[in-house]
Amino acid sequence: GRGRGRGRGQMTFSVEAVGIGKGDALPPPTLQPSPLFPALEHRAAPLPGGEEGEYMLALKQELRRAMRGLPYFVKPGAPRRDIERYSDKYQLSSPVDSAIDWNPDWRRLPRELK
């Protein structure tokens, strides 16, 4: 017959191709999840030490802090309460502009950024 009638269901692939013979027991189920990340083959290189490395790290942190203070940085929204009040739409909140006094060390940055 055609379609969904009575009868034995046919497999669409050959079970022998998978490696299971007729009458063989199925492999046991795995009870542990697979690892999320494979083991690292190579370890990460250590950070450069010394006074120059510390200076570069401090400069990077200062640059990131200053970039977060710019008005173009998109900040995550405040968490909403369970119930939104009608008056919440009309409360004024002005952004704080603290990026005006930022003076970077232009010798460390490319000319294109200047």
Image (cartoon, rainbow, N blue to C red):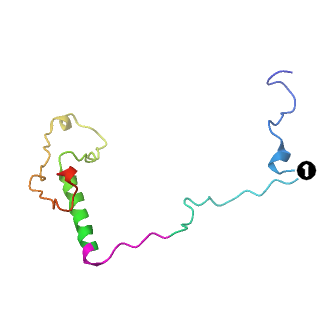
Q: Is residue 110 above or below residue 49?
A: above
Q: Is residue 60 above or below residue 6?
A: below
| Kind of residue indicated by mark 1 | Gly
The residue sitting at 82% across, 51% down in the picture is 19
Q: Position of residue 3 (x, y in %)?
A: 80, 23
Residue located farthest toward the front when viewing the structure as drawn = 111
Q: Position of residue 86 (x, y in %)?
A: 21, 33
Q: Position of residue 90 (x, y in %)?
A: 15, 35
The residue sitting at 80% across, 35% down in the picture is 12
* SS assignment at label 1: loop
Q: Is residue 54 above or below residue 113?
A: below
Residue 67 painted magenta: no
The residue sitting at 43% across, 71% down in the picture is 45
Nearer to me, 64 or 74: 64
Name the quarter where the N terminus is drawn: top right
Residue 49 painted magenta: yes
Q: Quadrant of residue 107?
A: bottom left
Residue located farthest toward the top when viewing the structure as drawn = 2
Q: Is residue 38 above or below residue 24?
A: below
Q: Main secondary structure of the magenta part?
A: loop
Q: Quadrant of residue 51?
A: bottom left
Magenta stretch bounds: 43-52
Q: Position of residue 28 (x, y in %)?
A: 77, 58
Pointer 1: what residue? 23
- Residue count near mark 1 (Cα–Cα under 10 Å), binned few <14, some 14–19, many ≥20: few
In the visual, does 20 lie left or right of 83? right
Residue located farthest toward the left when viewing the structure as drawn = 101
Nearer to me, 53 or 9: 53
Residue located farthest toward the right when viewing the structure as drawn = 23
